[in-house]
Amino acid sequence: MASWYIESGSESDVVFSSRVRLARNLKEFPFPSRMSKEQSSKVLDRVKEAMTNSSVWANANFKYLGMKEMSPIDKYTLMEKHIISPNIIESKLDAGVLVGCDEKVSIMINEEDHLRIQCMSEGLQLEKTFENCVNIDKLLNETIEYAFDKKLGYLTSCPTNLGTGIRFSIMLHLPALTMTGYMNGVLDACSKIGIAVRGLYGENTEASGNMYQISNQVTLGPREEEIMGAVKGISSRIIEQERALRRELYQKEPNKLADRIYRALGILESARIISNDESMKLLSDVRLGVEMGIIKDIALETINNIMLNIQPASLQKLVVKDMGPNERDVERANFVRKLIGNKL
């Protein structure tokens, strides 16, 4: 069965995925930035015990992965799948992640906060994803007492997560807004209404492949449903702008847009050496062609598969060997050709 990051879902012509993340801390321990290693080990044990004693453990078939026991390639592969964050990879504490069998649910332990409960879904499914996250949060809260203040809400390591501790994110593919230059206006408008626009892997990352994360900045004050509505509302407007621009580009100069898409496909079909940056830019154009129905013989799931597995760690895990940048560029070209190329 394909995982959420391969499958396509609702509004998949623009929407890649939906994510809901909850930040929580255990009442009796200091925040991770002030914890000792001994305390971090105790937090790990408490959370694992709470999960293994709950019904969700058996139903979702969770497994625990400790950061210290994992190889760098395995850790960065999880990051490329959005299962863990860059922060937890660099943690000096005893840290780990509980991952469901379908990888739609992950619980990072001892990241910036004691708990980062994260649920993912393909396409636009914020309500369902939010419901899954809340259910896990309630199960953990049955045996774990969270750090909570009646006025401030859930207490978190960073003030930007204070209150609900919730982050709603929608990953969008926005090539038309980017190539026409309108993306700068979107960024300005979002910043004025408390909506963050980040790159493929979140904060301080680039929008590789024209993939942008739309998420809330405000966590204190509004209720969770209000925050979700705001994120979904602005995302819906951006989705419609993207679709309108795609139609306009095609109606004005259909041959020019088709030429750009098929040139990108031609390079990917034939290249023997290709960097991650170049391949993501070309795949964005091909993805646009698939999403618009210009390219009819390549499935969107195939593009999703390629976009994941050409990333540095995922590619090395796929090939089952450590590689330097030059060798990765060769293997990346080989992999792309096998899936969409002429196989020569």
Image (tube, grey):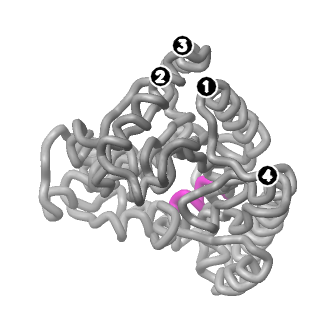
The correct choice, above or below, for 102 with respect to 236 in the image is above
What whole-number distance in Å separates the C-alpha atoms at marks 4 and 2?
Answer: 27 Å
In the rendering, which numbered label is found on residue 58? 3
Tag 4: Cα neighbours inside 10 Å, few (<14), some, or many (≥20)?
few
Q: Amino acid at mark 2?
A: Glu
> Which of pointers 3 and 1 lies earlier in the amino acid sequence?
3
Q: CA distance from mark 3 to mark 1?
A: 17 Å
Evaluate if marks 1 and 2 touch, with contact meaning CB atoms under 8 Å apart.
Answer: yes
Residue 300 location, x and y as percent?
A: 56, 46
What is the span of residues highlighted in magenta in the rendered image?
A: 286-292
- Image point (43%, 37%), residue name: 43
Amino acid type shown at disc 3: Ala
Is 37 in front, or is 224? Answer: 37
Look at mark 2 in the image and give the residue it sits on. 49
Q: Would residue 244 appear left or right of 267 to someone viewing this image?
A: right
Spatial CA span between label 1 and label 2: 9 Å
Q: Position of residue 84 (x, y in %)?
A: 43, 47
Element assignment for label 1: loop
Q: Label for residue 150?
A: 4
Within 10 Å of disc 2 (Cα), the crowding (few <14, some 14-19, many 20+) is some
Question: Which one is nearer the viewer's eye here, 213 or 224?
Answer: 224
Tag 2's secondary structure? helix
Cβ atoms at labels 3 and 2 below 8 Å apart = no
Residue toward you, 137 or 145: 145
Q: Position of residue 191 (x, y in %)?
A: 71, 80
Distance of label 1 from label 4 (alpha carbons): 20 Å
Query: What kind of element bears circle 4?
Result: loop
